[in-house]
Structures are given as structure tokens and as C-alpha cells.
Amino acid sequence: MRTLTKLDSESRHARRELDDHIKGSGPLARHTVDSDGRRQAGSSSHHESARKHVTGKASYIDDLKTPADALHVALGLSPAAFGTLTTLELDAVRQAEGVVDVITFADVPGHTDIGPVFPGDPIFVDRDVSYAGQCLFAVAATSFQAARRAVTLATIEIDERPARLDPVAAVEQGELVRPTHVQERGDWQATLAHAQTLVEGTLFVGGQEHLYLEGQACVVFPTEDEGVLVHTSNQHPSETQKLVAEVLGIPFHAVTVEVRRMGGGFGGKETQASPWACIAAIIARRTGRATRLRLPRTADMQVTGKRHPFHNRYRLAIDERGVIQGGDITVIGDCGYSPDLSDAIVDRAMFHADNAYSLGNARVTGHRAKTHTASNTAFRGFGGPQGMMAIEAAMDDIARQIGEDPLTVRKRNFYRKGCQTTHYGQTVDQIALLHTLVEKLEKDSDYWARRNAMTAFNASSPVIKKGLALTPVKFGISFTAQHLNQAGALLHVYTDGSVMINHGGTEMGQGLHTKICQVVARELGLDLDDVRISATRTDKVPNTSPTAASSGADLNGMAARDAASRLRERLFDFAAAHFEGGLDREGMRLEEGELIAGFGESEYHLPWGELVQTAYLNRVSLSEKGFYATPLIHYDRSMGQGRPFYYFAFGAAVSEVSVDTLSGEYRVDRVDVLHDVGDALNPAIDIGQVEGGFIQAMGWLTSEELKWSDKGALLSSSAATYKIPTFGDLPPVFNVSLMEGHPNSMASLYRSKAVGEPPFMLGISVWSALRDALSSLTHYRCSPTLDTPATPERVMLAAQAIRPKAL
């Protein structure tokens, strides 16, 4: 092995000049670890901002410094849910101490409707009020306190009418935000008509508040070219750029949106971060002053949408073994007052109405109900969890009807050879993985031994009942809107060998930026420390998709990989032609911070920093853009058939609970999870995503209850009235493992699989275990009705309702 130093004399001279300005040989000189320790994609590494998070150095929107004359915004909100605005008197507001500007619908210079996909979201109320908390006006003052005080001085009169809050009634009356959609496969009518046995049921699935640690916030700076620079906590910077530009009536290129990180998002900042940026931008341009808008927690909860509540109905034809032959499933999404993303969310609920089971000849119908609440929006799983709940309830119901264990029934109904096609026409691949994963978890968790012990315990315990459930997950990965399945990246290599990557995805704590840096490090043979990521900005990577649909790493990682591989190949071409004697282009590689060419004794090594500097001196570009578009996916909405997903991620969870059937109180005693991420990009981060997703779903299904008054006012509008899981709610035994040895069958990023949303649905096992415990009151002959969230009150009432059935 020889170190390659054969530079031509001109390059040597220029190199010496550069060395005067570059200390040492660049950052790579610090690293002597082997490839297994370089923390590239495929290995565990801490979050790229982990130390900043725990030391308080990570900057969020409220940490950004603004000029001394910056303005602060407070919002005037509607106290009524439905009616006509008859009086909005703001003279006292304008004259209040510290107030600089007050704006209403009439002051919007450009578009007044900021609906993200379909119209229906006015930036301010003009005349028609559609929900309690809808924005009527905004006040800009010299302090946040002054703005909030001034808001209370407004005179507001609304000709109030009864609010429509029942989505089922809304559907019956034809009140929809978007048309109903239907997916059909086979002759489901005949299958139901000739069914040996029918299983029917209804289920209400409650919504969920995002309750991110960092609320909705933005800071807008006016720029000298009549544009604005928007700093925002936002999952979709390009959409915010578009809406701000349209509201101001200026070209898109005059608006730059920057996102370094969010203090949580979960979907709540995909579309519903834009209104506040638009309002702040209007004020910033009117006044020429930096403008800050931060929603107080209660206002945040009042004005923003939630996870869609759903009303589900199912009617299934089964044979004597409990195997589904066909069925009819209806899902009704409570969309709130406007379309927002509800069309796609209800679609995804329909796509996932099967979960991991073959429905046979089936129809799935999705309604988009219009009600007078804040427009419900994206939330982790994007409708998929709500759609899965119906079929998981049906699995439990079938088991009780035929007298078998629910796990046995679930396994019989899994997608399998001869039954691999979904109700929307997509073939489910990797069915062997689904079966193998569940069988492994079944064995590793001692499911059957625990089931036997639990049955014996319940037989002798009249009040405390234990429940056990193993539920699977099959979750489709891709945006259901085809055009969103694209991403870009921008890569810079500097002359000291350090690397900067920028991409269109946003960081909300999920570790996306870490994985992107690991991808670039792997492609260029570097250590993770040698790659830095910059804030997501619309002037670096344009026209980006939201960070959503679990596709952040899949899309942006592939775009970053494309940029890095293009640059790598350019450097290989340069090195092969430049150095004296020539280098063998075939087999050239980047490893351990070096360019390596040849093999054995003729193997040449050149430090990365030296390669980069030499390329620069010879006028080789050290910057590259990358792009990726997901292949194969398509969906014919008129036919309700297609391939909306590139691949499926699988998983399963076993949950054990103990229930006091007199009081309804319960605890989760143990959870075992086995989840499929293909070949993991970062196992440590992936396990964290699985753990967090499970607990968030557990909260959704057990304690997080949204409440409205009869007049449509949100009552659960603070952390004091809305209960999320706390540390004390964690199961004392919580085993989480990643499925190994099963790479993605599709050509994904290093054969990995998405991990953002799929683990969320694992939490359904807790709800199913609660039903199992209640079913023991009837010696497992009956299945209880248990709407969600399954609060202790609901559990107590379900126990009271099912006890007489034991007689």
C-alpha cells in the first residue's frame, strides 16, 4: 500500500499557498476509527442536536433575537361556533397602549383564502363564522402583553345559530367538505347475502390534540426587496412560502421560509402553521418591522385542528373458522369546518381499513363530514390508525363469536398466498415477513403461557381482570397524493474537506437530519462529524414536499444520496485522469476518509482533504444537487384501484393490562414490541421512534379525551383539562426490538423502511387488551363495546353493560 502524493508541480505550488489559510489537513485528520465506528447510515448514533437539546443551546422560534422595535401579535377569536359576524368594532383596540397596527379581512392585500389544497380557509372571518376560535382580527403591539390586553377591548357581535357537531348527522344531511369515495373489490353484496355468519359492529374513535412542546410560532422579517424572511416552526416550508406570497400579492421568490427545527410537530404543523406566518407577514410588510406571533397554549388548542374523530361501521361475512369472506366497511371522518387535508386523510383510513387482513370481496366507503369545529388535520398515521380500529374491533368480535383466541383468528385472516390483494387492488408483498414477525413475537413474549395463566387468574378474581392482546400493523408508505413523492437536496464540499448538506425535509425531533448526514457520510466514506446540516430553506431547495407520511428519510435521504453519489463519481473521474501514471477508475472507492484505488500492493490511498483541495485547484465543482421521485406508485380515484404505496412496513405488539372492573381504573403491566424497519438507517433513533409512537397511541386510545360544549366551544383547551401519558403511565416492562434480517424488498434507501408513523398503530394492542379483560367477565363469550378514548369512566360503563351477558 502506498499513499498517493503524485501531484503536478502547479498543483503542489497552489496547495502550499492554500495551506497558509487552512490549519492542518482538515477535520478528517482527527478520525482514526474503523468503518464500523464512523456512525454512517446503518449504524446507531445520537441525534445531531442531542447535546444542544439537553444543554439548552438548540434555538427554537422563541429563542431568535429580534430588533428592539419588533412587534408582537395577538389574535381576536370568535366566541361562537356558527353564525354571522354583525359587528366588529376595533377603535378601542387601535387606541390601546402599545398598539401599532390592527388588521382584519379587509386589510389582506392578496388572496384571502389560504386553504392548502382546496379552498375554504379564510385568513380572517369576513362574515360567516364557522367555529369557536376562528380568527377575526390581529393586533400588533410593542409587547406581547400589550397585544393581548388590547384584544379584549374589541366589541364583537355575532348572530349565532346552532352549531352542527354530530358528523353522522352531517353525513345524513349531505353536509360534506369533500365528496364521498368508495373502493370496491369483488361481488361483496352476494358474499354478504350468502354469508354463513355475519359479524357487525360500530365504533367511535376519538380525536387527539397534538400538544407539541413548542406551540405554533413564527418570526417574520421584512426584506429590502419588498419580500419577507419567515422563520417558522413548520413541516411544510414550501407551502407556507406559497401562501405567504399569495396573501401579500408578491412572487414566490420574494418569500424565503427557514426552519431549523421544531419542538414537535406530529402533523399539526403541516398545514396549520401557515396562517400565523401569513398574518405576521402582512403586519411586517405594512409596518416595516420584524413581527413575532406565538400562540398561547389555550389559543393554540382552540384555533388548530386535531386528529380526526371517526365513526366506523363494519359488516363482515365469515366462515366457521372465523375467516373473512367479504364485507362492507364505512368510515366517517369528522373533518371540522373545511377540507384542509381531510380528503387524503379519509382516503388513508380507507386504505388501512384492512390492516394486515384479507377482506375478500369488500366495499369500503369514506365520508368527509362537515362540522362546526376547527378544521381537523394531519396527525401521525394520517387517518390510518382510525381506519385500522374497525377491523381490529372485528377481529376481537369474531373470536368471541366462534370461541377462539383473538390471536388465532388474526393469524387465520392475515394476507397469505392466494389472498394477497387489497380491496384497492395493490398486491401485498413480504407476506412471509408478516407471519414470521408475529410468530417470533408470539414466542418471545410467551404469549400462550401468559394467556393460560391469565385465564386461570381471571376465573378466580371477581373484580380485577387481566387482559392480553397481540395486534399487528401493516402500514403503507408513500404520500397518497402522487406529486408529493419527490424531494431535492443540495450538497457542498468545502476546501478543508468538510461537508454541508441541505434538503427539503424538516426536523421535528424525529432524527431526520441525523439520518441524512449519515447517508452523506456513507456515500463519501466519512465520519458523521465531517458532515453538517443546515436549516431547511426555500431558497436552497425549492418546491419541497411536507415532512409527513413517514417519507422524510425515504425521499430526502435518496435525494441526498443522489447528490453525494454524483459528486463522488465526479471526483473519481477527476482522480482517474489527473494523477501521474493514471489510476484505475474501476473499483475506486471512498473509505475511512480516503480515496482508495487499486488493490493489494498496487493500492493507492489519498486523504479526502487532499483530494478535495486538488479538485478545487483544478476547477472541479464541489457542489451538487440531488433529486428523487418515488417510482411505481399510482391510484385511479375514479376506479378506487391502484398502487398508492411503494411498500408496506410491518410490526406487532403484545400488551398486558390489569383492570378494576368496578371503578374502571386500569394499568398497562407489560408491552412487547417487534417492529420492521428493514435494514435500519439508525437503530437507536428507530427504537426511540417505536417507543414514542407506541406511548403516543396509548394516550390517544386511553386518556386523551377531547371535549366540546353544546355550543361548540373546546373545553379540553389546556394541559390541565387534557391528559396525555406521563412517565408514571409507562408500562414497567417495555420490551422493544427491531426485526432483523429482513431488508426492504423494494429499492428503498439502503433497503430500510420508514419508522415515523407505522409504530403508532402498535398502541391499538392496549385498547384490545382492555376489551379482552372485559370479555373475561362473560368467560370470553361476548365482546364489549368500548369507544375510544377508553377512559376509566368508559371502561367502568362497558363492564356494567357486559356483566349481564355472563348470565
Image (cartoon, rainbow, N blue to C red):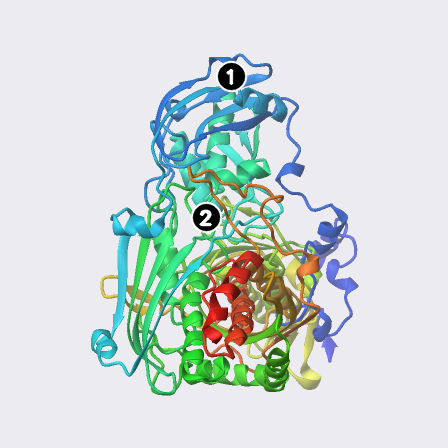
Q: Which label was assigned to residue 542?
A: 2
**Image coordinates for residue 381, horizontal then vertical, percent:** 47, 60
Kindly give the residue lying farthest to the front in the view shown.
807
Amino acid marked by disc 1:
Val
Image quarter for residue 431?
Answer: bottom left
**Image coordinates for residue 543, horizontal then vertical, percent:** 43, 49
Give the residue displayed 60% in from the left and 16% down from the top: 98
Give the residue displayed 38% in from the left and 41% down from the top: 372
Q: Is residue 64 left or right of residue 131?
A: right
Amino acid marked by disc 2:
Pro
Q: Which label was assigned to residue 275?
A: none
Give the residue displayed 45% in from the left and 48% down from the top: 542
Q: CA distance from mark 2 to mark 1?
A: 40 Å
In the rendered image, the vertical position of residue 734 relative to residue 95, given as above or below: below
Residue 551 can be seen in this image: yes
Front-most of 83 and 106? 83
- Quarter of the image with the N terminus in it: bottom right
Q: Secondary structure at mark 1?
A: helix
Front-most of 767 and 630? 767
Image quarter for residue 79?
Answer: top left
In the rendered image, the vertical position of residue 698 relative to residue 318, given as above or below: above
The earlier-in-sequence mark between 2 and 1 is: 1
Give the labeled residue for mark 1. 93
**Image coordinates for residue 591, horizontal then vertical, percent:** 66, 72
Give the residue displayed 31% in from the left and 59% down from the top: 366
In the rendered image, the vertical position of residue 374 relative to residue 414, given as above or below: above
Image quarter for residue 501?
Answer: bottom right
In the rendered image, the vertical position of residue 435 relative to residue 681, given as above or below: below
